Amino acid sequence: MKKRLMGMAGAAVVAMGVVTACGQAQSAPSSQANVGSASAAPIHLTLGMWASSPAEKQLVQRQVALFEKENPNIKVSIQVITGNYLQALQPMLAAHDAPDIFYVDSSYAPTLEASGAIMPLDSLIKQDHVDLSDFQKNLLDAFTWQGHIYGLPKDMNTMALEYNPALLAKAGIQSPPKTFAQFDQDAAKLKAKGIVPLDMPIDVARYYPFIVDMGGSYYNKATNQATFTNKANAAGLTWFMKEMENGNFVTPQDQGGSWAGVPFAEGKAAMALEGAWIVPFMQQTAPKMKYGIADFPSLNGHDANMLFTVAYEMSKYTKNPDAAAKLLFFMTGKEALKMTADSGLAIPSRTSEQGEFLKKYPSYKGFVDGLKGAIPYQFGTLGQNFLDAINNATQQGILKKESAQQVLSQAQQTLASQMND
């Protein structure tokens, strides 16, 4: 999970332009009442996925086995797509040879949905009486494009505050900060003891909540346009840049790590702001280290967070849309997500399953709490150009001690140039 999410903000998030189609929503065929029954004709489907671990594939296999038991005439083959998932999937969609349903990460979902290669689910959701009230709105928004729902989320992740109580105690701090005003006070105490307060990359995938908490927004979904130069963005970016400049935030690279989990696990920083993928990492690399997880601190009285989520979506070219819909709704339904919750491999996307998940895995509470104010990590079809423009401008701006306005203007100019190439 950690490697996949870190990759979202890297060079392989969106390979633009591979999938070519009309981009218009297509009507799905009507559901067949006998699809899945023993008396119906045999149907063969393929489910596409990546596998971050053998345990993830085993979970999907168990879910599929239960689906096949309940739908005896439908047989499902699992296709694990290795390497760069998106770069492998797009040619399949363009050739009308993609799996019937498949994983789609929210970061590039709009690119696929706008291509016209994905089946809209609206009519199938209505016909199959799928209960959408069990999903929080921001989770559904992550897979809604131009008013149509194209996917249902199978799991979710947000950021929380990881902290080392032993390092906090050295600075006389008894509990982690609940607000960033408290954090600044704690950071001063930690720096006085020679302790790095918090590991934080210069990456919009991590610092964007600060922009939103201060009233800004880098993206307008209604127009699918970047809004870097919106004056409201300057306050949040100025705050973030000052935290970097005064050493309250230190990049993982400055501490010899590829991401914040590495120096945190090594005891080089008192705190980090990462998602739940840090938990198995800590179990593997620092099993004896005692650390805690708290809610993402609020800023300016607000509690924005980042939402990382994955859905199942359906190829528009599936030969069996009714059966594929039945499989998709099962894999995102209560039975399958209860299995996800029991496994502990991911936080289930349905609210009804999150309570049981937390009873079994209480340390994940901060990540579940973060869902309420979380913004989907996606910026429409602008994809990697958007991320490169703002991340490079922010990194250079901090290095050169530029103003937030200069950074935002440079990002807007760079993106315009990239989109015109």
Image (spheres, rainbow, N blue to C red):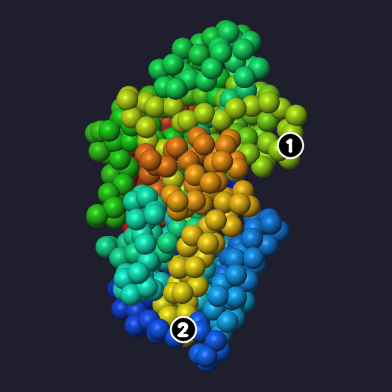
For image coordinates 28% across by 44% down, the residue present is: 227
Is residue 256 visible from the viewing direction of this image? no
Residue linked to disc 2: 35
Q: Residues within 10 Å of mark 2 (few under 14, many from 20)?
A: many
Of residues 123 and 68, which is closer to you in this image? 68
Name the amino acid, label 2.
Val
Above or below, 325 against 270 in this view is: below
Q: Mark 1: which amino acid?
A: Thr
Q: Give the residue at mark 1.
A: 285
Q: Choose top left, top right, bottom left or bottom right for residue 234.
A: top left
> In the picture shown, does residue 374 fall above or below 189?
below
Q: Residue at x 59, y 15 (%)?
A: 168
Residue 401 in the figure: left or right of residue 357: left
Q: Position of residue 356 (x, y in %)?
A: 53, 46
Q: Is residue 16 visible?
A: yes
Using residue 260 as the reference point, say whether residue 117 is left or right of it. Answer: left
Left or right, 301 with respect to 118, comes to: left
Total number of numbered labels? 2
Q: Residue at x 27, y 39 (%)?
A: 229
Q: Element at badge 1?
A: helix
Q: Residue 346, position in %: x, y?
A: 57, 50
What residue is drawn where x is 73% and y is 37%? 285
| Mark 2 vs mark 1, CA separation in Å | 47 Å
| Residue 306, percent from left and from top | 43, 41
Front-most of residues 198 and 335: 335
Q: Quadrant of residue 12?
A: bottom right
Compared with 244, 20 (above or below) is below
Q: Quadrant of the C terminus?
A: bottom left
**Which of pointers 2 and 1 lies earlier in the amino acid sequence?**
2
